[in-house]
Amino acid sequence: MDEYKLHTICQSGSCPNMGECWGAGTATFMILGNTCTRSCSFCAVKTGRPNEYDEDEPRRVAEAIKLMGVKHAVITSVNRDELKDRGAEIWYQTIRAVKELSPETTIETLIPDVKANWEALERMVSAGQEVVSHNMETVQNLYRKVRPQAKYERSLEQIKRIKAYGKRTKSGIMVGLGETHEEVFQIMDDFVAHDCDVLTIGQYLQPTKMHLEVAEFVHPDTFAMYKEVGLSKGFQYVESGPLVRSSYHAERHI
């Protein structure tokens, strides 16, 4: 990571599973810099005006994945709302470069909200990746508080459009922010209605004192119940547990 000057959400997002995943030789690459144009109240990635747009980044990511011998690569990015194409061209070139150097490697892309720029979305998801994820993060009632620059219905539409492009679709939410069981069941129904195949559910942990406080530490039995309910509603795969994050055990979701 250091040698190729690459970012990971593992580090930038202060993920609690970094030791486990890095010990197993897996990591989630974060492209388009490490400064996000959004200011979501749960996220540890720094917010600001990005000055990084590295056209050589796709090559370096691809070479690192080949050197690491990664069998299933996960790639994500910060939001780049200031770019007309939302960073779609770097996304496309990165995936193509990985496929060229490591044709046996499967790829999951965790993409940001494109603010209804559907041309950018099509470019992002048309490069040959097997799974496309877009995280909703929380239930509808908490959206303004948790994702103030996002829209619940718009993110659902983005997932439905990804499925229409023929991709395996995936999304994730956090619990412990003050949601009710009924609200979690409702977002599950909304996911299924918008063709989401895979769901991840994890406990929100406060990254700094500047971020939202934890409303509740959800019991493991509740996570098990959410998994059972999710599978009964029609998801192909549900990963649910306190330390589950979007990319945790991502290789199983293929």
Image: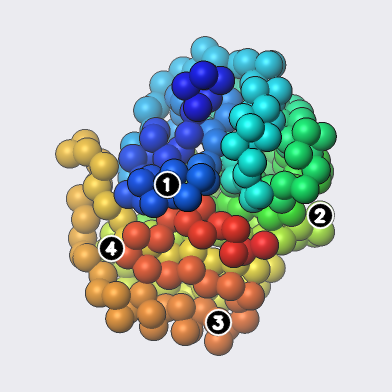
**Which badge, 1 or 3, is on the more N-terminal residue?**
1
Q: Are marks 1 and 2 in contact (CB under 8 Å)?
A: no
Residue extending farthest top: 51
Residue 87 position (above or below residue 148): above
Q: Amino acid at mark 3?
A: Leu
Q: In whole angstroms, how far apart are the C-alphas of marks 1 and 3?
A: 30 Å
Q: Amino acid at mark 4?
A: Gly
**Residue carrying label 3:** 231
Circle nearer the viewer, 1 or 3: 1
**Residue carrying label 2:** 165
Where residue 32 sits in the image (x, y, percent)? Answer: 58, 25
Q: Residue at x 33, y 40 (%)?
A: 14
**Residue carrying label 4:** 176
Where residue 201 sits in the image (x, y, percent)? Answer: 43, 65
Q: Amino acid at mark 2?
A: Tyr
Q: Residue at x 20, y 50 (%)?
A: 213
**Which badge, 1 or 4, is on the more N-terminal residue?**
1
Q: Residue at x 39, y 27 (%)?
A: 47
Query: Would you say residue 194 is visible in this rendering?
Result: no
How many residues crowd around disc 3 within 10 Å: few (fewer than 14), some, or many (20 or more)?
A: some
Front one among 105 and 137: 105
**Residue carrying label 1:** 23
- Judged from the image, the secondary structure of the residue bearing numbered disc 2 is loop
Q: Quadrant of residue 120?
A: top right
Circle nearer the viewer, 3 or 2: 3
Q: How many marks?
A: 4
Q: Residue at x 65, y 23 (%)?
A: 60
Where residue 61 sits in the image (x, y, percent)? Answer: 63, 29
**Which badge, 2 or 4, is on the more N-terminal residue?**
2
